[in-house]
Amino acid sequence: MTLETKKSVFVELGKFLSQFSEEQSVQKSDVLYNDIFFEDFKKLIHLSQSHNGWYTPEQVYFALQSWAEALTDENLEKWLSQYEADFAQNDIKEKTVALILAGNIPLVGFHDFLSVLITGNKALIKTSSNDQHLLPFLAKYLIAVDESLKDKITFVEGKLENFDAVIATGSNNTSRYFEYYFKDKPSIIRKNRNSAAILTGKETHEELEQLGEDIFRYFGLGCRNVSKLFVPKGYSFDAFFQAIFKYQDVIHYEKYANNYDYNKAVFLMSNFKLLDNGFLTLKEDSSYASPISSVFYEYYENLEELQKRLETDSEQIQCIVGTNLTSDTIAFGETQKPQLWDYADNVDTITFLLTTK
């Protein structure tokens, strides 16, 4: 398969995914193989919550729409054009790349899957027990579009064997196991990361509303979800609480509510001072990783010192949200809309796959 052929296959997948939305899923006449896949995928979306209680239809539809918007010819061209010289090399050898995927949010491992196939390699995939159905279904669709992919995609349940490189995502604990187990293989090993927002007190109501999207999307389970706020000394959280009130319905979801009740009780029994609005607790804490239904906050004296702190802690941070306060801040409301060229942990997966021998 040429690179153009590979891109066209994923563009077709993007067209397929674009048909599915929370408001209404409409079958389009120009999408390939709808007669085989459309109705079955609709059913799978609504079954997802029975497979993983966090995968509500709303969250699954959001993930699908995000990928539909990403998988366009224009985006794929913009993403891959920077690697033209690497793709042009004649000595690129096909590799089998083991993918150990996470399952915290729907299709969280799709970018690695896409990267392996678009670079002409084979994907040997071990899905998370929390997300075992969506990616295999999409793989079947891709194979229907181009049958040559059948030999490029393998899902395994047991031990991973006969591979040349590995991309593994897990917790800080499992990453130590991965680093030992795969020490003789070229690898990308991803650990726990969290995202933070920098507030100045000058944010508009709309910006703080959008920050709520960064906090509550996927119930806060993603590494791109904001779990930590940096606020100036004397900051009042009144405007923040008013703005995020639109997300109050999250407490009606049982799994979230159970976490809210449990974590709030643990904090109170430990005599921690909390700010609480009935569906989110705020706790002053220097850590980045807050539990579900809680966000940590920390005061800062000046932005220059905060920037140095964030640079020191860079390996713990996935995204920084704010209004052009640093060179790498993301706009409010955009954390769960990464582009194809926004790499997890800032590790360029395409370069790794094209240059690893």
Image (spheres, grey):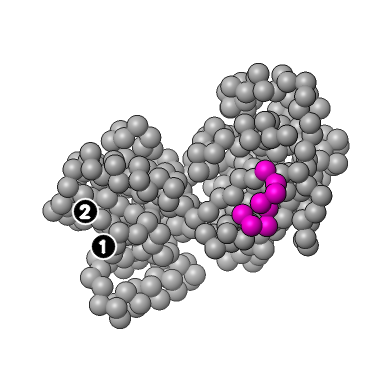
Asked if residue 261 shows in the view, the reply is no
**Residue projecting furthest to the left:** 234
**On screen, 60 above or below 281?**
above
Q: Is residue 129 magenta?
A: no
Residues at circles 2 and 1 in contact by the CB criterion of under 8 Å: yes
Say which quadrant the N terminus sits in: top right
Amino acid identity at mark 2: Tyr
Question: Mark on residue 284?
Answer: 1
| Residue lying at 58% horizontally and 66% vertically, measured from the top left | 53
Q: Judging from the image, what secondary structure is the residue with disc 2 in?
A: strand
Question: Mark on residue 299?
Answer: 2
Amino acid identity at mark 1: Glu
Q: Is residue 183 magenta?
A: yes
| Residue lying at 34% horizontally and 54% vertically, measured from the top left | 228
- What residue span does the magenta drawing correspond to? 179-186
**On screen, 48 above or below 98?**
below
Residue 103 percent across, percent down from the top left: 60, 57
| Residue lying at 18% horizontally and 43% vertically, measured from the top left | 302
Asked if residue 306 shows in the view, the reply is yes
